[in-house]
Each structure stands twice: as structure tokens, then as C-alpha cells.
Image: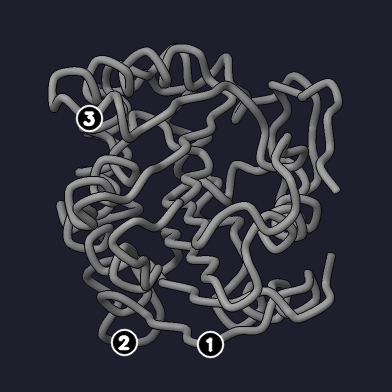
Amino acid sequence: MSKHTDIPLSGAANADGIGVGGADGSGVMFDAIAERYDRLNRLLSLGLDRGWRRRAVRAMNLSVRGHALDLATGTGDLAVEIAQTVSSATVVGVDPSAGMLGEARRKVESLELSERINLQQGSAEVLSFDDHTFDAVGIAFGVRNVSDRVAGLKEMARVTKIGGRVVVLELGEPRGILGLGARFYLHQLVPRIGGLLSGHREYRYLQKSIQAFPGAPEFADLMEECDLEMLELVPLVFGVANLYVATPRSGSS
């Protein structure tokens, strides 16, 4: 059954993933940094985000004419990667930020992908799609900004076809001794550079949202509690990012 309701377009996530009205993380905040967001992603991900997106697309396991949903599409990088990798796939990209969607539309039009990528303003927690609509659902570097992660994950499970894939790519706190260099980069160097690129208020939110995000095993457990069956959890570069691959549980909607 589809859900058609008013879509909340603001609200931040606190450490527990519960909305904090009017705080950083809203669509309005991302409107303010939309033109600089691609550079921020390069910075936050040590310049590795493009390769990670390619890996996420492979994990979606889409057929040639597959139909995918890209949540928190932002400037459209994951949607574009899907369309360019899977020759006849169609993609719906959803984001709460009008500014980010404006950047995404310019990118999609410049690559002549408008016929295959449909961009819409909306929230991950309340999707206006029927049950089992998509062959795969992906969200890259956006789930930590979802106000109510439980609701968002359950919606991802609901709109994905049984046997399809739900793929989450998200930044995290690097773990272990081998992650010391990455932690120094994230906590000492990135704040200085990021403040110059995005504005100190916006950047502080982005950095804190990474620190507050649950550890990979805990987030995988949360996905299991939200009508999803985990298939794979892949740490990337000592946990600078993690790739979570799941499928909806049969009879979950």
C-alpha cells in the first residue's frame, strides 16, 4: 500500500537518529551548501567517494532495465552512477533540499540523462511509492541525516521488491590502530579545510553527524530490526566508510 501524506522537509538527527526540529541537518542547511557539497564529499571521504559509489552500484545487483531509488540523492552522484553503469536502468532520486536537487538537475541535464533520472523533493521517512516498486534502493552518505532512521529503513524495505537490494553507503569513525591516520585526518585536518569550504556552522554539523553515527555492527543490527535481512557488511579503508547490503524480509510490508 502506498503512503501519500505531507512530507516533512526539515529536522536533524541527534545521536539516536531522532529528529530535532529546526536544527542543523535540515533541507534548509543543505540548501546553503549545495554548490559546495561535491567538494565536501571529496574531502570527507579522503577523495575515495567515487569508487565507493561504484561499489555500491554493483551491490545493488540491478538488471539492465532495473528500476532504482536513490534516497538523499543530494547532487545526484549515486543516481548518475547507476544510470551510467547500468545501461537502461531508470532512477528516481529523492531529497529534502531544493538547493541540492537544483544542482542535481543541472548535472543530470549536462550528462543528457534526464529521460532516465527523475528527481523529486521528499523525505526518506515518508515515501509516496507503492510497496515493492523498486528493484533496488540506495542511499549514499545520507542515512546519518535521516531524522527517524527506523522509519526511513522500514520505508526502504517497504518500497523494495522481495529479492531486491537495499544498499547503504555511509561514513563512519575509523577503527583500530590502522585507522589512527584516518582519524587524525578527519579530526584535525578536515575541520580546518571543511570550515573554509562549507562555513563553520554547517561543517560542524557534518563532522559531528559522522562521530554520532552508530558503529557498523550496531547499525547493521538496526537494519535487521527494520524488516531487512543483512547480506553483507563491508568496511572500507579501516571503517572510514561502510557498505551495508540487505534485502527485504518476505512479508515485511
* Image disc number at residue 177: 2
The mark lying in front, picked from 1 and 3, is 3
Say the numbered circle drawn on residue 231.
1
Numbered circle sitting on residue 113: 3
**How many angstroms separate mark 1 from mark 3 (CA)?**
31 Å
Most foreground residue, 78 or 22: 78
Mark 1 or mark 3, earlier in chain: 3
Q: Residue at x 83, y 29 (%)?
A: 4
Vertical relation: 233 (above or below) 236: below
Helix or strand or loop: what does disc 2 sit on? helix
Of the residues shown, which amino acid type is indicated by label 1?
Leu
Q: Secondary structure at mark 1?
A: strand
Quarter where residue 114 is shown = top left
- Residue 134: x %, y % from top left: 56, 55
Q: Position of residue 234 (x, y in %)?
A: 39, 82
Label 2 crowd bin: few (<14), some (14–19), many (20+), radius 10 Å: few
Whole-percent x and y of residue 220? 62, 78
Q: Amino acid at mark 2?
A: Ile
Residue 250, can we see it?
yes
Local packing at callout 3 (Cα closer than 10 Å; few below 14, some 14-19, many 20+) is: some
* Of the pair 156 and 186, the residue shown nearer to us: 156
Would residue 211 be found to the left or right of residue 181 on screen?
A: right
